[in-house]
Image (cartoon, rainbow, N blue to C red):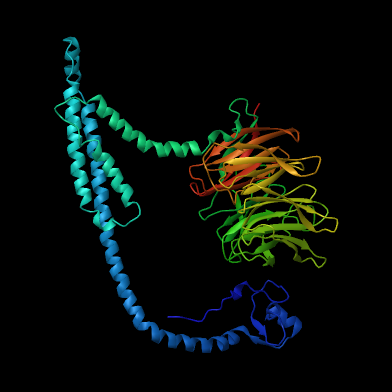
Amino acid sequence: MFNPKPIENLCDYQCFLNHCMPICAVNMQPGLTSNQRFVCKNCIKITHLPVSPLKDVIQTIEKPIQQKLNSYEQIIAPYLELLKQLYGNISLMESIILQQLDQMTTIVNNWITSIKERGEQIARYNFFDQLDLIITKQQPKNQLETKQCYFDLITLNKTQVKQLNQYLDPFKYFQGYSKFQLLLKYIIVSQDQYDIKEDFTFSEKQRLQSISKQKQQPLEQELSGQQYNQYPLLKECSVNISFSYEIIPKLTFEQGELCQALAINYNNTLIAIASECNINILKINQSLNQINRPQLLQSLQKIHKNHVTILNFFKKESLMLNFLVSGSLDSTIIIWTPDQQQINWNALFKLRDHSYAINCLLISQSSRDHLMISGSADKTIKFWSLTIQNSWTCSQTIKEHTSYVYGLSINDEGNKLLSCGNDNYILIIHKSYKQQWQVKQKIHNDGISISFITDEIFVCQSIEGTLLTFHIMDQTNGEYIKQNSFQIQTGGKGNSLYFPLHYNKSKNILLSKNGHNVNLISLATNSPSDCQIILEQAIFFVQNMIFGTMSDDGNLLITWDSKSSEIQFRKYKEKL
């Protein structure tokens, strides 16, 4: 029934020399740390350490644990049998309750159908009979028909309520039972005092209108509490649109598995797409003039242990050009290196300092240094530096956020960093002359993604995905202050955690995912205090599970959505 299982996932451990090969043995010498214990075949060849095979060590550890488990199974066996019988009885009760609910659902559906059928009967008329009434100037007896209709409705409602009450006893203590009874009361209360022999009096109408008003009040209060006019709307340009992204119909790639991350390399020839725990590398035609389907170069499998959430290509002119970095829900970051032909990628480094999911990761494009920055559900921001030995190490950790880190953005100079998190705070972080990063300002503002527009302007998207808040730098003290908020009403609410804001400097376009829409917003920044914002295009998707990114030159927009289950390509086109 039970088998020994280590708390640690031994597959996640590397050898002490980081060869990126499976561990096969254990160094049994005393005084070593856990990171120095495991070795691979290459370690053994190089160091000739006295080691014990990993399998033998595991068997030695698990033998006494298995004996304890066997004794425990003998003790719990009779109790488990009784609990199985108890579970069977609960399942039987569940079946009875579900049958009761099915009966009630059928009654209400039939009730609705009967009322609609009566309406359909009233709607049908004989054209020639009605024509004769007009010609002979006779009035139809609408009053008698109204009374009869109302009487029929009373009879139907009372019959159906009586049937429902037969099935309600088992649910008296359920949440929602009192509201259910209140709805039945509303249906009956408007019928009890109606006299079929008298006209439908004005006082009776007033009473029913009062009941209807009471039922509508909570909804009106809810709508008034939302304060829709609190923020100016994002201006949508429906005339004289300056550009749009047009889909390339035949340039698609089928992707049935969940794709939460996409990345394009520096010259738009390679695309990396997440496929749940795996990564697919695609090659596309550089000019996009020829309509050819993307070519799958390689599928990077079984390295990440959970869904891939972040993908980024290294784009600086260096030896790391077209290297790929990935982050995952398994809390690891992997750097992948291509061969010379850029056909095969291999895992070069696996960084494990985070303890929970990687939510955001960026690569500084500054020419001064090689730097990666990651944000995690473990509430930390980590800075990764390339050492002289060409290995990556965590050089600094910031722990100012008190909940999940959601979004990161770095300026062009590489000396200012923005972060936003689930604690509803934005951090403005500066790099000091000692190459250390320090939090200079905290702004209370909820946000799920964030992006620099210029060094003096940044924008943050709300956690619900419907609000863009712009902040500008105060020239007197260098701190950022809130300037404007714009409510996006082009698709409803929708989480955009793994489809973050993306500002494209070359085209001056802000890419923002909102509900069922991918929005393309143009920005005209005449001065830090004058930023004109125009919604140029809103691309609608049937479902709101959408992920995507844009190329550096702004010419290519790629998306994946759960409805089409394919990678779609759109090309930038200016309007004449």
Where is residue 82? Give x, y as percent.
32, 78
Write down the quadrant of residue 184 in the picture. top left
Of residues 62 and 529, the one nearer the viewer is 529
Residue 358 visible? The answer is yes
| Residue 499 located left or right of residue 107 | right
Instruction: Name the quadrant of the C terminus.
Output: top right
**Quarter of the image with the N terminus in it:** bottom left
Query: Between 446 and 3, which is closer to the camera in this rendering?
Result: 446
User: In the image, what residue occupies the spot 51% across and 86% down?
Assistant: 65
In the picture shown, does residue 10 fall above or below 73? above
Residue 30: percent from left, percent from top: 71, 88
Q: Would residue 408 be seen by someone viewing this image from the given angle?
A: no
Residue depicted at x 72% and y 41%? 481
Left or right, 111 with respect to 445, comes to: left
Camera-side residue: 223 or 272?
A: 223
Query: Residue sitting at 23 percent across and 43 percent down?
Result: 110
Decide if residue 211 is on the left or right side of residue 438: left
Q: Give the residue at x 64% y 34%.
A: 573
Q: Is residue 80 above or below residue 71?
A: above
Give the vertical position of 33 relative to 264 (above or below).
below
In the image, 21: left or right of 494?
right
Q: Residue furthest left?
A: 197
Q: Where residue 55 sits in the image (x, y, percent)?
A: 58, 84
> Please, which residue is most extreme toward the front here?
203
Q: Picture coordinates of residue 9 (x, y %)?
A: 58, 74
Q: Quadrant of residue 8?
A: bottom right
Q: How many marks?
A: 0
